[in-house]
Image: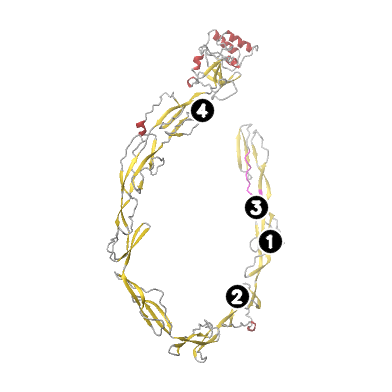
Amino acid sequence: RYTYTFFDSFGNIYYQVTDDYGSTIIPPKGPIRENTPQYTYVFIGWDKEIPEMMTKDLSFYPVYDEIINKYLVTYLDGDDEIFYQEWVDYGDNGSIPLDKPTKTPNQQYYYVFRIWDRKPIYITQDTTIKPIFDRYLQVYEVQFIDEEGNVINKQNVEYGMGAIEPAIELIPTKPPTFEYEYIFVGWDKPFNFITEDTIVQVRYAPVVRMYTYTFYDSDHVTILKQVKGAYGTPIIAPTPPDRELTDHSYERFVGWDKTVAATLTENVEYYAIYEEVLKTYVVKFFDGNGLVLDIQIIEYGKPAKSPAKTPTKEMTEKYEYFFQDWDQDFSSVKNDLNIYPVFKAELRRFIISFVYEDEIIEILKPYGSSIDFDIDPIPTPLKAGHSFVRWDQDLTNITKDIETYPIFKANRYKVFYYVLDADSGSMTNDVVTYGNEYQLRENEYYKLGYEFIGWRLDPDSNEPVYNPNMKIIFDFDGNLELYATFKPINYDVIYDTDGGSSLSKDTYNIETGLSILPTPEKEYNLFLGWILEDIILSEDEQKYVSITIDPDGNEFITEIPVGFIGHVKLKARYLYNGFIELKDEYKDKYLIAYADVTSIIPITKREKSENDVYLFGAYLNQTLADLKEKFINENLEFVDESGNTIDNLDSIVRTGIRIVIRDQKDPSVFIDQVIIVLKGDVNGDGYINVNDYNTILLHIKYVKEMEKENLLAALINDDEYINVNDLNELLLHIKEIKN
């Protein structure tokens, strides 16, 4: 045994393997050597070639490629952003940028680059170099402007310093308005500590101006009112008194010589204006109850007008009053007047209102009279489902207006429950008050094959008006006749296809039946028909119907006839129309297989194939009838080598007979066939004798060709070869030495 030893860069054992002479090994991955600040080490191999086979002890040392390290030199600007970068080998010097860095100015300072804080000499690591700046105060412009934005004075001022206020003679004055005079009061902002460009605007203070307003009498001399006030003071005019002229007239103040302004905006004078007017008097008209009906102001000597509203007087229980005239003349008014109406008294008449639904009949009757229903035109009120009883008010000795309504009593009617075509049941009738809620009776009629769906009003209709057990408001003006309504029950027809194609269920009812049943498909099977497997009836249906199911399943169902009821389950029956198949209990004794010359290939599952199929396991002197019983197929036939049907099933089996199944739809077509191979019956005569021995011998000597099934019959010892061993086995059988 030999050892390969692998060392790391420090001479320590990195990996070691010991194995037998001539063994091969897989070399380890190269050991990692720690990098230095100056170099990076990359493994490139071992110091000697590693032999493919171990023949002696060997040591191996790693070999590395030594790569000098590079470092990043970064120059920053005044805002600590990258200004310039370069890679420099370990120990070398970097280069200084030609451009100068900048630093963003702020509100107080701006910056000028002076020098870098270090030089890029002998670089041994990533290096950051920062700039050094000189700083200077920012200079801002200060403008002094007037109210129109015109510049009065400009100054340049350093940050934090104050501007100098302009000389007073440079500051403009502001002209007065009607309302104000203006005085200079300063500037809109301070300017003693400047931190940015600044505009300083002049400011003025308004002083309200003073004015006087004066009101004179019509003589333009007498002062009625005089006020001195500030601009905008409200002007309040005096009200001069009226002045007596004659017994029937006076002077009345009508206004001022000009419109009085709302506020004082200048010195102003107003003069009173009067007009001569006649004296007026108050004329009052009263109604019959002592209340004022109308008031009129009438000038001296002019007439008053009769009020537009006719005066009334409150009625008594017995009398009402009608206006005739006024109690005095008012055609020439010369003093204040109170005028009263004159009335005529008559017996009162009252309105009797007979109110029913949307109709109102009004009868006018005098005080103390009565309604005469035989003479007065008042019809008897009618109401569906009700009888009239009386009016709700006393209509004798009438002393007031009356509104009266009829009183009715709800009628009672019968409810009849009928059925026209039921199998059983009876129902009693009810008596119901019109307008009441009524619970329909539960149906007690039964009709085979139908379900109750409600009650109809018309015996000739098929549509129910009321659902079962429904609550209704009885609003029929007469007896109610209800007719039980039925509809056919839909029954399911469920198909058990017994492994065939799935079929959806059908429905039928007692009136329609089901005239066409579906046809399922099942691979290698011919559908024969449906048998009745089960019928499900309700408890009520079982009272009227008794159905017997054929226990042997020999009776086919072709339709569900009209009049039939119940949920039906049908099961499909087939005739196997597929491959020839052995019964399970014979599959260990017989074999259906393909064959490739003399190689037998068992078939695990029958399927369509162009290859011939063979049956092995038939024995000497076995009849065709006995062999037929070993298959599941009921429609097997036996055909000889010429294609003729073998009808005599007592015939013995022999090599070459074909077991066939005809297509039930086209009997001229074989849908499957299997060739019988009887071991030892090489010539196909059903016997094993010297003829078979000679046939094999001629084949071995290449003198005679044989069909495939004859070759297969010649495989006596089951070794896939036809030779002297098969001859020996056959000879022993012929001599009855061996079966």
> Would you say residue 442 is visible in this rendering?
no
Q: CA distance from mark 4 to mark 3?
A: 85 Å
Secondary element at tag 2: loop
Q: Amino acid at mark 3?
A: Pro
Closer-to-camera residue (600/450)? 450
Of mark 2 and mark 1, the one earlier in the sequence is 1
Q: Amino acid at mark 4?
A: Lys
Label for residue 677?
none
Q: Position of residue 703 (x, y in %)?
A: 65, 11
State which quadrant residue 315 falls in: bottom left
- Circles 2 and 1 in contact, beta carbons < 8 Å: no
In the displayed structure, would residue 258 be above or below residue 409? below
CA neighbours of label 4 inside 10 A, class few (<14), some (14 to 19), many (20+) = some
State which quadrant residue 172 falls in: bottom right
Label for residue 37?
3
- Say whether residue 23 is magenta: no
> Would you say residue 155 is visible in this rendering?
yes
Instruction: Nearest to the eye among marks 3 and 2: give it.
Output: 2
Instruction: Nearest to the eye among marks 2 and 1: give it.
Output: 2
Q: Amino acid at mark 1?
A: Lys
Q: CA distance from mark 2 to mark 4?
A: 106 Å
Q: Magenta segment range?
A: 27-40
- What residue would you read off at disc 4? 522
Of mark 3 and mark 2, the one earlier in the sequence is 3
In the displayed structure, would residue 516 be above or below residue 349? above
CA neighbours of label 2 inside 10 A, class few (<14), some (14 to 19), many (20+) = few
Q: CA distance from mark 4 to mark 1?
A: 96 Å
Secondary element at tag 1: loop
